[in-house]
Image: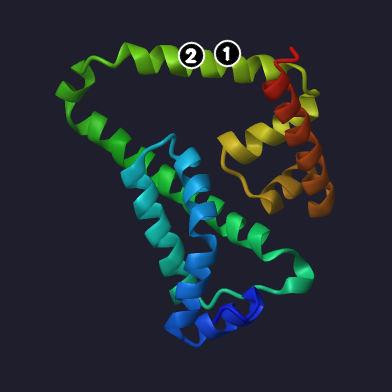
Amino acid sequence: MRDKDDEELMRLINDKYRPALEEIYDRYIKLIYSFTFKFTNGNKEMTKEIIQIIFLKLWTTNSTYQSKKGSFVNWLLTITRHVCVDYIRKDYAYLKHQFDVDPSSRNKIPDPYNEVETSLLRNELSAAKSKLSSAQKRLIDLLYWQGYSLIEIAEIEKEPVGTIKSRLYQSLKRLKKYLELGDT
């Protein structure tokens, strides 16, 4: 299987050839794990559940990857991001329901360290975001905080998806610069 490219492996996965899925897993598990781990803010159990969902999705949905449309890594990370967003949304809805049903859970005392750390990170991100244009801030908010897909954002902004992707790339590049350099 190591001699096959990613597109061939995906065709074999669609034909339910298990060694192909195992090869994709071996090639990309570290990348998917690190992406998901960061997305879940270091929650190992949630990360493991999401990874299972991702590979189950690859196995069961007859996903089609076409190399002429882009790199396999980007395609796989897009799937990973969508699964993460869906999982977090479902988890949030479940927790919200639990708080609404169980009034005693509202009385739990939060961990002050997590609140301080979260506040510092929020302030750092806010300072970096303040350096972006309003259009760049809006794009990042729509995609990452409100969970819209690139296609949905393109419809909202009445722009081609390619334009939205380009703007997103530039926005994230600029945001990363500000976060890394503390250039605020």
Task: Tell me, yes or no, if residue 35 can be seen here.
Answer: yes
Which label belongs to residue 123?
Answer: 1
| 27 relative to 88 in the view: left or right | right
Residue nearer the viewer, 165 or 34: 34
- Disc 2, SS: helix
| Residue 145 location (% of width, % of height) | 57, 34
Residue 80 position within the rendered picture, expressed as x and y whole percent measured from the top left = 53, 55
Residue at horizontal 50 percent and vertical 73 percent from the top = 23
Which quarter of the figure has residue 132?
Answer: top right
The answer to which quarter of the image holds residue 153 is top right
Is 32 or 65 nearer to us in this picture?
32
Q: Quadrant of residue 134?
A: top right
Q: Are marks 2 and 1 in contact (CB under 8 Å)?
A: yes
| Vertical position of residue 77 compared to residue 34: above or below | below
Mark 1: secondary structure: helix
Per the model, the C-alpha gap separating discs 2 and 1 is: 6 Å
Circle 2 sits on which residue? 119
Amino acid type assigned to the residue bearing label 1 in the image: Asn
